[in-house]
Amino acid sequence: MFKVLITGGAGFIGSFLAHKLVANGNKVIVVDDLSMGRLENLADINDKIVFYKHTVCDEQFMHDLLLKGDFDYIYYLAAVSSVADSVVRPWYTHLVNQESVVNTLEFIRANHLPIKKFLFTSSAAVYGNAADFPKTEDSHVDPLTPYAIDKYASERYTVDFGRLYGIPTVAVRFFNVYGPRQNPNSEYSGVLSIVTKCLKEDKPFTLYGDGAQTRDFVYVEDVVDALIKISTETDEPAVYNIANGDETPLIDVIHTYEDIARKKLNIIQKEARQGDISKSRADVSKLKKIGFEPQWSLHDGLSNYWKYYSEN
Ligand code: UD2
């Protein structure tokens, strides 16, 4: 049994991670200010975890927690995960997405906290419009928004604190994660959360562009398995892509989902979004080298997603 801290543990991915770690018999502590996360996401494991409604930007709180917590693993998922918000509020999102991370790393360093791993979660957003394809962890980066810049900087800090000071760290870059509990309520929410909501509520779905744009969709349960594997099976501070390694045109995903739901999506087509990338796929060979294989095909992931919503 390990003591595990998950910042952002009430969010979409964080809550799945919390469920899995609890099921594996670990003691889980969650810090989340509920700005994006939701307590309902943790309802099933409420009595098995310790939950703090708190911002990671509160230095004193975080220092006390880190000092007393005696954590083996720290999964850093707390973030303002909206690119659009980072464009509107770059200073505030910078404090959450970068400064809080460096502050935590620095506190671990200064106090010689004996953690087994600090894992920081970054994003495929760091690749921006760089031309390399598919994206390997060594591909060029081109962070184009405050969100991407902060994610990139924090990931570099994470790796460098490992290299400079010997702290066991690792960072990951999420591609397009989907699954139950992803919040569909902003126009910048993950596209499959929006499609799910539109299918379920028979609402029109706005398709930006012709649907030929591809993405590397990865089911949230696979993401959690990858996070656990990366935190336990790696020795060097490094960066790992987390994705399926496949690219699928958005329109094909929609058609597959329509078949699963046995419903037709009411699609309204609009101009492609400014800055939208036309193709995205990760090279996941580095992840596979440590023994990870995605278990969820797009069809199975979507089926499970739909089942969840039909039952809830
Ligand atoms: C993902 C991340 C974003 C940033 C970016 C970096 C998510 C939710 N977003 O954006 O934060 O890291 O990668 O490349 O993970 N679409 C529609 N209709 C909608 C919503 C979306 O057609 O109502 C399209 C959208 O224009 C895009 C595709 O669906 O072509 C995927 O959109 P997304 O926002 O889910 O993800 P992405 O890859 O653009």
Image (tube, helix red, strand yellow):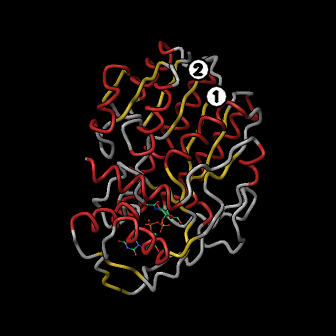
Question: Is disc 2 placed on a helix, strand or loop?
Answer: loop
Which type of secondary structure does the marked residue at label 1 adopt? Answer: strand
CB of mark 2 within 8 Å of CB of mark 1? yes
Can you identify the residue that label 2 sits on?
A: 72
Quarter of the rendered image showing ligand 1:
bottom left
Please tell me whether residue 116 is drawn above or below residue 243 in the rendered image: above
Quadrant of residue 32 within the rendered picture: top left
Nearest to the observer: residue 64 or residue 266: 266
Residue 94 point in image, percent of width and height:
45, 50
The quadrant in which residue 190 appears is bottom left
Residue 16 percent across, percent down from the top left: 44, 39
Q: Residue at x 51, y 37 (%)?
A: 76
Question: In this picture, is 60 found above or below 297?
Answer: above
Which residue is located at x 39 percent, y 54 percent?
305
Q: Which mark, by number, is residue 213? A: none
Crowd class of label 2 (few under 14; some 14 to 19; many from 20; radius 10 Å): some
Look at mark 1 in the image and give the residue it sits on. Answer: 117
Whether residue 87 can be seen here: no
